[in-house]
Image (tube, rainbow, N blue to C red):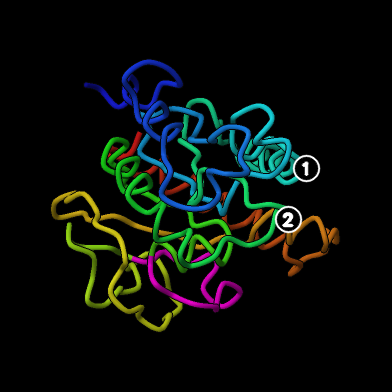
Amino acid sequence: MTAAADLAPSGDSLAAECGACRRCGLAETRQQVVVGRGNPNARLLLVGEAPGAEEEACGQPFVGRSGRLLEAMLAAAGLSSEQDLYIANVIKCRPPGNRKPSRAEIAACRPWLERQIALVRPQLVLLVGATALEALLGIRGGITRLRGQWLQLETSQGPDQLAPSQASQRQPTPSPRSPLRWPDQGEGGIALMPLLHPSYLLRNPSEAEGSPRWLTRADLVAVRDRLGRDPCLG
Protein backbone atom coordinates (compact mmCIF):
# COMPACT_ATOMS: atom_id res chain seq x y z
CA MET A 1 0.00 0.00 0.00
CA THR A 2 1.28 3.50 -0.83
CA ALA A 3 1.90 6.15 1.78
CA ALA A 4 -0.98 8.20 0.37
CA ALA A 5 -3.40 5.29 0.65
CA ASP A 6 -2.32 4.15 4.11
CA LEU A 7 -2.43 7.69 5.48
CA ALA A 8 -5.90 8.36 4.02
CA PRO A 9 -8.60 9.16 6.61
CA SER A 10 -10.76 6.14 5.83
CA GLY A 11 -10.66 2.46 5.00
CA ASP A 12 -7.91 0.02 5.97
CA SER A 13 -5.47 2.77 6.91
CA LEU A 14 -3.32 4.08 9.69
CA ALA A 15 -6.03 6.60 10.55
CA ALA A 16 -8.60 3.85 10.93
CA GLU A 17 -6.27 1.86 13.17
CA CYS A 18 -5.51 4.92 15.30
CA GLY A 19 -9.24 5.47 15.66
CA ALA A 20 -9.55 2.08 17.33
CA CYS A 21 -6.52 2.58 19.60
CA ARG A 22 -7.01 2.06 23.36
CA ARG A 23 -3.37 2.14 24.43
CA CYS A 24 -3.77 4.99 26.90
CA GLY A 25 -6.40 6.91 28.84
CA LEU A 26 -6.76 9.58 26.16
CA ALA A 27 -9.05 7.15 24.33
CA GLU A 28 -11.63 7.76 27.07
CA THR A 29 -11.87 11.51 26.50
CA ARG A 30 -11.22 12.03 22.79
CA GLN A 31 -13.82 12.96 20.21
CA GLN A 32 -11.69 11.65 17.35
CA VAL A 33 -8.06 10.99 16.52
CA VAL A 34 -5.99 13.52 14.60
CA VAL A 35 -3.45 11.76 12.41
CA GLY A 36 -2.01 14.12 9.81
CA ARG A 37 -2.46 16.28 6.74
CA GLY A 38 -0.50 17.47 3.74
CA ASN A 39 1.48 15.56 1.13
CA PRO A 40 2.36 12.04 2.37
CA ASN A 41 4.90 11.74 -0.45
CA ALA A 42 6.78 14.90 0.56
CA ARG A 43 10.39 14.63 1.72
CA LEU A 44 9.71 17.11 4.53
CA LEU A 45 7.88 16.02 7.69
CA LEU A 46 6.74 18.46 10.39
CA VAL A 47 5.96 17.01 13.83
CA GLY A 48 4.24 18.97 16.60
CA GLU A 49 3.00 18.06 20.07
CA ALA A 50 -0.71 17.15 20.17
CA PRO A 51 -4.06 18.32 18.79
CA GLY A 52 -6.01 21.10 20.48
CA ALA A 53 -9.75 21.70 20.55
CA GLU A 54 -10.05 22.98 16.97
CA GLU A 55 -7.82 20.20 15.66
CA GLU A 56 -9.91 17.57 17.42
CA ALA A 57 -13.13 19.08 16.09
CA CYS A 58 -12.03 18.90 12.45
CA GLY A 59 -9.64 15.96 12.64
CA GLN A 60 -6.56 17.76 11.28
CA PRO A 61 -3.38 18.99 13.01
CA PHE A 62 -2.34 22.64 13.24
CA VAL A 63 -5.60 24.33 12.23
CA GLY A 64 -6.23 26.45 15.35
CA ARG A 65 -4.52 29.74 16.24
CA SER A 66 -1.09 28.11 16.31
CA GLY A 67 -1.79 26.39 13.02
CA ARG A 68 -2.90 29.56 11.31
CA LEU A 69 0.30 31.29 12.38
CA LEU A 70 2.32 28.31 11.20
CA GLU A 71 0.56 28.37 7.80
CA ALA A 72 1.29 32.08 7.41
CA MET A 73 4.95 31.59 8.25
CA LEU A 74 5.30 28.61 5.92
CA ALA A 75 3.70 30.58 3.09
CA ALA A 76 5.96 33.58 3.75
CA ALA A 77 8.95 31.25 3.42
CA GLY A 78 7.62 29.83 0.15
CA LEU A 79 6.49 26.47 1.54
CA SER A 80 3.09 24.89 0.93
CA SER A 81 1.61 22.63 3.61
CA GLU A 82 -0.34 20.81 0.90
CA GLN A 83 2.56 20.17 -1.46
CA ASP A 84 5.91 20.55 0.28
CA LEU A 85 5.38 18.77 3.59
CA TYR A 86 3.35 16.34 5.65
CA ILE A 87 2.19 17.49 9.10
CA ALA A 88 1.69 15.23 12.12
CA ASN A 89 1.84 15.30 15.91
CA VAL A 90 3.56 13.14 18.49
CA ILE A 91 0.16 12.47 20.10
CA LYS A 92 -2.92 11.63 18.02
CA CYS A 93 -5.55 12.37 20.70
CA ARG A 94 -6.19 15.67 22.44
CA PRO A 95 -5.05 15.74 26.08
CA PRO A 96 -7.85 17.15 28.29
CA GLY A 97 -7.53 20.89 28.73
CA ASN A 98 -4.80 20.95 26.09
CA ARG A 99 -2.29 19.95 28.77
CA LYS A 100 1.16 18.67 27.86
CA PRO A 101 1.06 14.92 27.14
CA SER A 102 2.63 12.65 29.73
CA ARG A 103 5.64 10.49 28.97
CA ALA A 104 3.42 7.41 29.29
CA GLU A 105 1.05 8.83 26.66
CA ILE A 106 3.97 9.67 24.39
CA ALA A 107 5.29 6.11 24.74
CA ALA A 108 1.84 4.63 24.06
CA CYS A 109 1.48 6.70 20.87
CA ARG A 110 5.04 6.12 19.67
CA PRO A 111 4.20 3.14 17.39
CA TRP A 112 1.76 5.31 15.41
CA LEU A 113 4.37 8.02 14.92
CA GLU A 114 6.96 5.44 13.89
CA ARG A 115 4.46 4.04 11.38
CA GLN A 116 3.89 7.52 9.92
CA ILE A 117 7.62 8.12 9.62
CA ALA A 118 8.06 4.74 7.90
CA LEU A 119 5.29 5.58 5.42
CA VAL A 120 6.41 9.12 4.61
CA ARG A 121 10.15 8.26 4.66
CA PRO A 122 11.18 11.90 5.11
CA GLN A 123 14.65 13.19 4.46
CA LEU A 124 14.04 16.40 6.42
CA VAL A 125 12.12 16.55 9.71
CA LEU A 126 11.02 19.68 11.57
CA LEU A 127 10.58 19.17 15.33
CA VAL A 128 8.11 21.83 16.42
CA GLY A 129 8.42 22.46 20.14
CA ALA A 130 10.02 20.78 23.13
CA THR A 131 7.68 17.76 23.21
CA ALA A 132 8.56 16.79 19.63
CA LEU A 133 12.26 17.28 20.36
CA GLU A 134 12.07 14.95 23.36
CA ALA A 135 9.79 12.36 21.73
CA LEU A 136 11.82 12.00 18.53
CA LEU A 137 15.38 12.55 19.74
CA GLY A 138 15.27 11.97 23.48
CA ILE A 139 16.45 15.54 24.19
CA ARG A 140 14.79 17.15 27.20
CA GLY A 141 14.88 20.93 27.07
CA GLY A 142 17.21 23.01 24.97
CA ILE A 143 14.76 23.96 22.21
CA THR A 144 15.87 27.61 22.27
CA ARG A 145 19.51 26.54 22.00
CA LEU A 146 18.97 23.94 19.29
CA ARG A 147 16.35 25.68 17.14
CA GLY A 148 17.46 26.45 13.63
CA GLN A 149 20.26 23.87 13.62
CA TRP A 150 20.35 20.90 11.27
CA LEU A 151 21.02 17.66 13.14
CA GLN A 152 21.91 14.55 11.17
CA LEU A 153 20.39 11.13 11.81
CA GLU A 154 22.48 8.45 10.14
CA THR A 155 21.00 5.01 10.81
CA SER A 156 17.72 3.12 10.85
CA GLN A 157 18.11 2.11 14.50
CA GLY A 158 18.32 5.59 15.99
CA PRO A 159 21.67 7.21 16.77
CA ASP A 160 24.03 6.54 19.62
CA GLN A 161 24.92 10.17 19.09
CA LEU A 162 23.25 12.81 16.94
CA ALA A 163 25.86 14.84 15.10
CA PRO A 164 25.46 18.41 13.81
CA SER A 165 25.00 18.59 10.06
CA GLN A 166 27.75 20.13 7.96
CA ALA A 167 25.13 22.70 6.94
CA SER A 168 25.15 24.07 10.49
CA GLN A 169 28.03 26.18 11.72
CA ARG A 170 26.94 25.97 15.35
CA GLN A 171 27.83 22.95 17.44
CA PRO A 172 24.90 21.48 19.40
CA THR A 173 25.42 18.97 22.17
CA PRO A 174 24.82 15.46 20.77
CA SER A 175 21.65 13.75 21.95
CA PRO A 176 21.26 10.34 23.57
CA ARG A 177 19.93 7.50 21.48
CA SER A 178 16.66 8.34 19.72
CA PRO A 179 13.62 6.62 21.25
CA LEU A 180 12.23 5.92 17.77
CA ARG A 181 13.09 3.50 15.01
CA TRP A 182 13.81 5.42 11.82
CA PRO A 183 13.77 4.25 8.20
CA ASP A 184 17.18 3.83 6.64
CA GLN A 185 17.64 6.68 4.16
CA GLY A 186 21.01 5.53 2.94
CA GLU A 187 24.18 7.59 2.86
CA GLY A 188 22.36 10.91 3.18
CA GLY A 189 20.59 9.97 6.39
CA ILE A 190 17.82 12.17 7.80
CA ALA A 191 18.31 15.83 8.69
CA LEU A 192 16.25 17.26 11.57
CA MET A 193 15.72 20.85 12.66
CA PRO A 194 14.09 21.91 15.95
CA LEU A 195 11.72 24.88 15.64
CA LEU A 196 10.01 27.05 18.23
CA HIS A 197 6.35 26.12 18.64
CA PRO A 198 3.86 28.64 17.18
CA SER A 199 2.01 28.71 20.52
CA TYR A 200 5.20 30.21 21.98
CA LEU A 201 5.34 32.68 19.10
CA LEU A 202 1.75 33.74 19.82
CA ARG A 203 2.86 34.71 23.31
CA ASN A 204 5.81 36.64 21.86
CA PRO A 205 4.35 38.75 19.04
CA SER A 206 7.37 40.97 18.39
CA GLU A 207 8.65 40.91 14.80
CA ALA A 208 11.89 42.72 15.67
CA GLU A 209 15.19 41.34 14.43
CA GLY A 210 16.36 38.59 16.77
CA SER A 211 12.87 37.97 18.20
CA PRO A 212 11.46 34.41 18.32
CA ARG A 213 9.25 35.12 15.29
CA TRP A 214 12.10 36.64 13.34
CA LEU A 215 14.30 33.65 14.11
CA THR A 216 11.58 31.16 13.13
CA ARG A 217 11.01 32.90 9.81
CA ALA A 218 14.75 32.66 9.12
CA ASP A 219 14.71 28.98 10.09
CA LEU A 220 11.87 28.25 7.63
CA VAL A 221 13.70 30.08 4.86
CA ALA A 222 16.70 27.82 5.56
CA VAL A 223 14.39 24.81 5.23
CA ARG A 224 13.05 26.09 1.91
CA ASP A 225 16.55 26.73 0.64
CA ARG A 226 17.70 23.23 1.58
CA LEU A 227 14.71 21.71 -0.23
CA GLY A 228 15.43 23.84 -3.27
CA ARG A 229 19.14 23.17 -3.58
CA ASP A 230 19.10 19.41 -2.99
CA PRO A 231 17.79 17.49 -6.04
CA CYS A 232 17.16 14.45 -3.84
CA LEU A 233 14.56 16.40 -1.84
CA GLY A 234 11.28 17.22 -3.52
**Which residue is at the far right?**
206
Cβ–Cβ under 8 Å for marks 2 and 1: yes
Type of amino acid under label 1: Arg
94 in the magenta segment: no
Q: In this view, does 187 lie to the left or right of 129?
A: left
Check the image and report above or below for 200 versus 116: below
Q: How crowded is mark 1: few (under 14 residues within 10 Å), some or many (20 or more)?
A: some
Q: What stretch is highlighted in magenta?
A: 137-151
Task: Examine the image and state in which quarter residue 39 appears.
Answer: top left
Residue shown at the point (50%, 39%) measured from the top left: 87
Q: Is residue 128 left or right of residue 198?
A: left
The picture places residue 219, in percent across and down from the top left corner, at 57, 57
* Number of marks: 2
Residue shown at the point (40%, 84%) measured from the top left: 173
**Which residue is at the far top?**
11
Check the image and report above or below for 179 versus 86: below
Q: Mark 2 points at which residue?
A: 199
Q: Give the prevailing secondary structure in the magenta stretch.
A: loop
Q: Is residue 230 left or right of residue 228?
A: left
Of the numbered discs in the image, which one, if any, rests on residue 65?
1
Distance CA(mark 2)–CA(mark 1): 8 Å
The picture places residue 110, in percent across and down from the top left corner, at 37, 54
Secondary structure beneath dot 2 equals: helix
